[in-house]
Image (spheres, grey):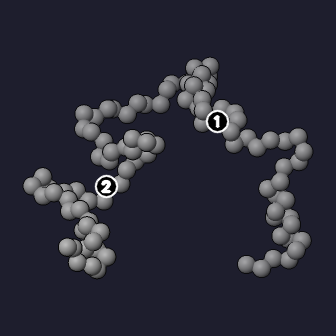
Amino acid sequence: MTLAADEFIRRLLLHALPRGFHRIRHYGLLASARRKDHLERARRLLDVAPPPADEPTDEPSPQPTCPCCGGTMVIIEVFERRYQPRAPPPPSLSSGTQAP
């Protein structure tokens, strides 16, 4: 897309805030750090019924979570119990030279 210089600057300045203003992404009721606490308090003060809780199932989650970050891991391959995953060939065979 080609823009005239004045249109480009106008669009760019739509993202710039005046001096003294702060972006509210990390502030307010919906700030991720205490979102649940704030929403629960707002519901209590407004006397609003809490959202219906999902019924817990006894089944384990279909996809495991990462032990490092807690994100959902994607299963690429599942091996049957009777088969062992193959290891890569030793470095001497993979480099094209023969083993002694």
The Cα–Cα distance between marks 1 and 2, rounded to whole angstroms, is 32 Å
Mark number, residue 1: none
Residue at image position (43%, 31%) is: 52
44 or 83, which lies in front? 83
Report x, y in % for residue 70: 43, 41
Q: Does the rendering let one see residue 39?
A: no
Residues packed near mark 1 inside 10 Å, few (<14), some (14 to 19) or many (20 plus): few
72 or 100, which lies in front? 100
Residue 19 found in image quarter: top right
Q: Does the rendering let one see residue 54?
A: yes
Locate residue 32 relative to residue 15 in the image: left or right: left
Report x, y in % for residue 99: 21, 73
Mark 1 near mark 2, Cβ–Cβ under 8 Å? no
Residue for badge 1: 31
Residue 8 found in image quarter: bottom right
Identified by mark 2, the residue type is: Ile
Query: Label 1's element?
Result: loop
Report x, y in % for residue 53: 40, 30
Residues packed near mark 2 inside 10 Å, few (<14), some (14 to 19) or many (20 plus): few
Residue at image position (46%, 43%) is: 69
Residue at image position (20%, 62%) is: 86
Residue for badge 2: 75
Q: Earlier in the sequence, mark 1 or mark 2?
A: 1
Q: Is residue 98 above or below residue 71?
A: below
- Quadrant for the C terminus in the image: bottom left
Residue reaching furthest to the front = 100
Query: Label 2's element?
Result: loop
Q: Is residue 97 above or below residue 31?
A: below
77 or 52, which lies in front? 77
- Quadrant for the N terminus in the image: bottom right
16 or 99, which lies in front? 99
